[in-house]
Every structure is written in structure tokens, then in C-alpha cells.
């Protein structure tokens, strides 16, 4: 069994801590640089070679690596293996997860309801193959549609998008929050916290209302705060 978490880089632990603390993420007990919104676990990594992506823990990735080598480049690291899919770094750590984390049904951060990680893919079929090897299954959408939604056994979800589907900035990868009618109030709270907004989106309504926004953490990880 594997466990999947978010990895976000930083050039300033204090700035990253402030960002997540202001948004009401909580520190995982016993870990100084690990935060959660209840539904997802996020590790802040100050190593200068760290990159935005996901980190997956499992005792052995040998069977998966044999299959992945036919699809993408694999780099050995001290803890396991490293690969890249459409600009998203995937860390395959060969060990049990140090985190005893069980996702809750609801998020408690200011950002609202976390739904998964959004990724743009230049080759949707290849990306689906990569994530299937890593233990993900399709739960919505499909290769004949503009997107594919996948999830693995620890309920870590990803949204794979074809190119030219999203009429807004897209940072690969981006954590995605869907808040329905509550999103306007959530956007206002984010403004009151003086969190910089990377884009105010009005595209999806005819009134010019900012009903969706995008923010980024100090390491560049994107956040879609949407009213889907």
C-alpha cells in the first residue's frame, strides 16, 4: 500500500509557514514543515533541488519502474526514484510513509473544499498510462473527453486536462478547491487575509463577477479556488 502527499518547494520556510497558517492549514503533529487542510497532506521542502509535485511512499517501486521506463525517463535518488509527467515531478520513495494520516471527509482551511490536483497534459493517453501504473484508476471523464479524473487507493485525486481547455492561467500542478455558491465569500476572506491573487476570473459569467480565483504559495504551487 502506498501513501501520496503534496510536495511544495520554498526559498523561505517562514514565508511558506505564514502562507499556510493564514489560510488555516494545520501543522501535522510532530512535523515542523508538514501541513494539512484535513483532506490532503502537504510537505514544505526547502531543499534547493526540491520541485513542485507529489511524493508517493511504498516499500518497493521496482515493478512499476520496469513499466515506467518505457514511457518516461527515470532518475534514481537517494530515497528511491524521480520522474516527470508534463512538468509535474513525481517522487517515488521506497519506504513506508512516516505520516499516520487519514484524510477527513471535509477540509477545514479557508480555501474550502479540496477536491484534488489539477494537471494539464500534452499527451492525455500517456499521462493516464503513467498514473495507472502508479496505482490510479479512472473515476470520471475519459480519453475521448476533455479531461480524465483519477484516484488511487488512498483517495488521492487528480484531474488531467487536455491542452486549450482552461481559459485562465494554469500552473502545473495546482491544488483544486470546488466551493459552489460559497466561493464568493471564500474569495472575500482570502482578500481580507491579504493573500496575493494571481488571477481574478470572470470568464464563466456574463456579469463580470470575479467568481473564481487562482493563488500561488511562495514556492509557486498553484491553487484553483473555483465555484464548480
Image (cartoon, rainbow, N blue to C red):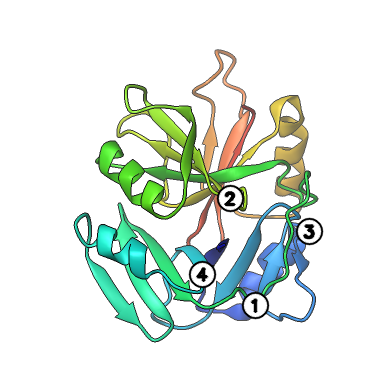
Left or right: 164 with respect to 25? left
Residue at the disc numbered 2: 153
Q: Disc 3 and disc 2: Cα gap in Å?
A: 27 Å
Give x and y (percent) for residue 147: 40, 30
Q: Is residue 104 above or below residue 228?
A: below
Marks 1 and 3, Cα distance to the nearest angstrom? Answer: 23 Å
Q: Which residue is mark 3?
A: 24
Discs 1, 3 touching: Cβ within 8 Å: no
In three-dimensional space, the C-alpha distance between marks 1 and 4, rounded to whole angstroms, equals: 11 Å
Q: Is residue 210 left or right of residue 107?
A: left
Name the N-terminal-most of marks 1 and 3: 3
The residue singled out by tag 4 in the image is 58
Other residues around mark 3 within 10 Å, as few (<14) / some (14–19) / many (≥20): some
> Please, is residue 47 above or below residue 103 in the view?
below
Which residue is label 1 attached to? 98
- Mark 2 and mark 1: Cα distance apart in space: 18 Å
Instruction: Name the element at disc 2.
Output: loop
Amino acid at each position: 500500500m502506498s501513501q501520496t502527499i503534496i510536495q511544495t518547494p520554498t526559498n523561505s520556510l517562514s514565508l511558506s509557514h505564514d502562507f499556510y497558517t493564514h489560510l488555516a492549514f494545520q501543522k501535522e503533529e510532530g512535523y515542523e514543515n508538514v501541513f494539512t487542510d484535513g483532506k490532503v497532506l502537504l510537505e514544505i521542502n526547502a531543499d534547493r533541488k526540491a520541485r513542485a509535485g507529489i511524493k508517493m511512499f511504498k516499500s518497493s517501486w521496482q515493478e512499476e519502474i520496469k513499466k515506467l521506463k518505457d514511457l518516461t525517463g527515470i532518475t534514481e535518488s537517494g530515497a528511491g526514484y524521480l520522474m516527470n509527467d508534463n512538468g509535474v515531478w513525481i517522487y517515488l520513495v521506497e519506504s513506508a510513509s512516516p505520516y499516520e494520516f487519514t484524510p477527513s471527509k471535509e477540509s477545514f482551511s479557508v480555501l474550502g473544499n479540496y477536491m484534488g490536483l489539477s494537471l494539464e497534459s500534452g499527451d492525455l493517453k500517456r499521462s493516464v498510462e503513467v498514473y495507472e501504473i502508479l496505482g490510479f484508476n479512472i473515476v470520471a471523464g475519459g480519453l475521448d473527453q476533455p479531461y480524465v479524473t483519477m484516484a488511487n487507493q488512498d483517495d488521492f485525486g487528480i484531474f488531467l486536462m487536455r491542452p486549450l481547455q482552461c481559459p485562465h492561467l494554469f500552473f502545473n500542478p495546482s491544488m483544486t478547491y470546488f466551493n459552489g455558491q460559497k466561493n464568493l465569500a471564500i474569495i472575500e476572506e482570502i482578500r481580507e487575509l491579504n493573500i496575493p491573487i494571481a488571477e481574478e476570473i470572470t470568464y464563466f459569467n456574463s456579469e463580470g463577477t470575479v467568481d473564481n480565483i487562482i493563488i500561488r504559495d511562495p514556492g509557486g504551487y498553484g491553487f484553483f479556488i473555483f465555484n464548480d
